[in-house]
Image (cartoon, coloured by chain):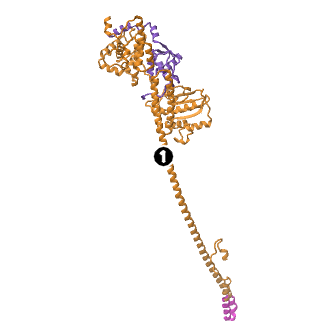
Amino acid sequence: MSESLSPPGGEQPPVRSQRPPFLTPAISLLVCAAAVAAAVLFAPNDFRLPLAIGASVAALLLTASVTAAVFYRGRARQLTREAHAYRAQADARVAATIAAAQARIAESESGIAALREQVAEQARAAKESENRRAAALAAFAGAAGRMQAASTSMLAELREMEHRHADPKVLADLLELDHRTAQAGRLADSIAVLSGARSGRRWAKPIAMESILRGAMGRVAGYQRVRLRAITEIAIAGHAAEGVMHALAELLDNACNFSPPTTEVHVYAAEVPAGVVITIEDSGLVMSESALRRAESAVTTRRRPTDLSSLSGTRLGLAVVGHLARKHDLTISYRPSAIGGTAVVVVVPRELTTRLERSTTSSRLTPLPATTGPQPAVPPRPAALTQHTPAAVLPTVHQPTAAAQLDTDRSVHEVSAAESGKIGEDSTTSGGLPKRRRGSTLASVHPDGLGAPAAPARPRPPASPNSLAAFQRAVTGRDSGGPAPAAFTNLDPAALTNRGQGSAGDSGTGRGEFGAGARAASLLDGIRRGESRRENDGGTPHLPAPPTSWETDR
Amino acid sequence: MTRPDEDPDRLYTLTGGRSQADSDAFDLVTLVVSECDPVRGMQSEHAAILDMCRAPTAVVEIAAELRLPVGITIILLSDLLAAGKITVRHPEHAARQWNWSPDTTTLEKVLVGLRKL
């Protein structure tokens, strides 16, 4: 029995030697049998049989109960012992498990410590690489900014040179240089955009859509293949103009690069309720659906900003466009083009657009003042334009009497008067007053020109006599009081006084140089040519003779 | 050096890269008259020239108004001339046409008359 109860697989619990189970009932049976025999022996005879039966039964019962008691006691003892053994066993196991667990805890703690160190190291490395990245980006941004500044100033200087040199060959070279510089500037802009610097220059005023498109066009190599259509009278706000232009330039460059060089790239701009939609359409390779999707996802606004790792080699264009689109909230989509290539549709949001008045659309042109009626206000002119006043003044010197052209002349007078408004005001307050009155009298007597019949007096712009005085001074070469208009201070006095010596050669140089004085001189040369012809015919030198002698001549 | 109000478009984009005019009809003092009104969709410089030249205007003046070099202006003008949108007159032709030549005595008379006003 104890064998079967022993725990399986474990060590045998210590079991004491047990009395054989039959011993207890045998002893108790003997004792009881003796007691029964004694009782039967001493009992009266007639009572012996029942006594023997009862005592036997009692003895049997007693024996059985004693046997059972002894058995169960022994069993209980054994179980207690086994329980002790199990407990000890369990205790040992628990202790072993605890020890093992502790060992593992210690082990994993050391592992954790090692991992922590590793993590710290990696964090350090990550921070270092982040620092490196930031430093590299800052360096790129700085370099790109300087390249941008250099290209901007180079472009401005080239513009100046283009104004200075009229020789077609020189001009062609300058334009070529200009184009190359613009392309280099675009590359600098791209690097600046990708490195997170601000993009290019900022424009103080809204830029007309036409200028935006042409500015974008001027920055790509194949600009001669680009055809602009349907220019809207819309301008892009100055702060976004450069970004939009740059994005369009990149898209145009893509369109030019991925279409045969003999084909044209068409650009349409149209106004829609959402803003301005610009379509760039080429007839090059048709992009596959997946390529379209890929290109679109590169420029879409939903992706996270600037991931430099997604750049592939030298193809920066789409990443730049995507960045600019996110920055300015442009919507860009690709679709197959009807003319056999790919079309890119750019929507510039309405917030970035302003309406452009027609007068400013026709760029720098100021509307000519009406030829009749009072002049309500002097139109504002850019300060730089006053340098060009001689060009406006001098043609009036050239053809002063043709009746039909006097309207023109007068309007030109008024423009020039408006342009040199400041100078005119100066001369009203200084000694030029009498001339002013005479001039206005002339204007009021002959409002429609000398050839027309006299008409009632009409108000004239105040600066008109000033140009008359300028005319006089120019012809006589005499500086008669009051500040001379800027137009004539630039003139070479010799060109005014040495009349009759002018020749076609002079006008040739005047054409070459395009300064204010040179232009004036060249126009005067026109007069001189006419006069020198007259002098050759008649041969009477006139100037420099004092005007008073003319009066006495009469 | 840098003019703050400069426009972003470059000169070669105005002329399509040309630096030499096709025609030699233009001089600094050639008079230009527009023959039609500007239409929508036209290059803005062309529209400006057509606006400006409703009355005869000299080439230098157009260039100054457009703030473009004369060479570039002449290219734009020759495009317009080729398209028949403008006509040109040389001042001497104009003078002959009006039966007027720059007579110095007339000029003197004008000047004297002006002084007497």
| Residue A431 appearing in the image | yes
Q: Is residue A49 magenta?
A: yes
Q: Does A121 sit left or right of A39 as displayed?
A: left
| Residue A358 appearing in the image | no
Q: Is residue B10 above or below residue A532?
A: below
Magenta residues (range): A31-55
Colour in which the image shows chain A: orange
Q: Residue at left 64%, top 75%? A: A12
Q: Is residue A500 magenta?
A: no
- How busy is the neighbourhood of tag 1: few (under 14 within 10 Å), some, or many (20 plus)? few
Q: Nearest the camera: A423 or B52?
A: A423
* Element type at mark 1: helix
Judged by its main secondary structure, the magenta piece is helix
Q: Is residue A528 above or below residue B20?
A: above
Q: Chain of mark 1?
A: A
Q: Which chain is purple?
A: B
The three-letter amino acid code for the residue at tag 1 is: Asn
Give percent across and percent down for residue A321.
53, 35
Residue beneath label 1, please? A131
Write down the quadrant of residue A459 in the picture. top left
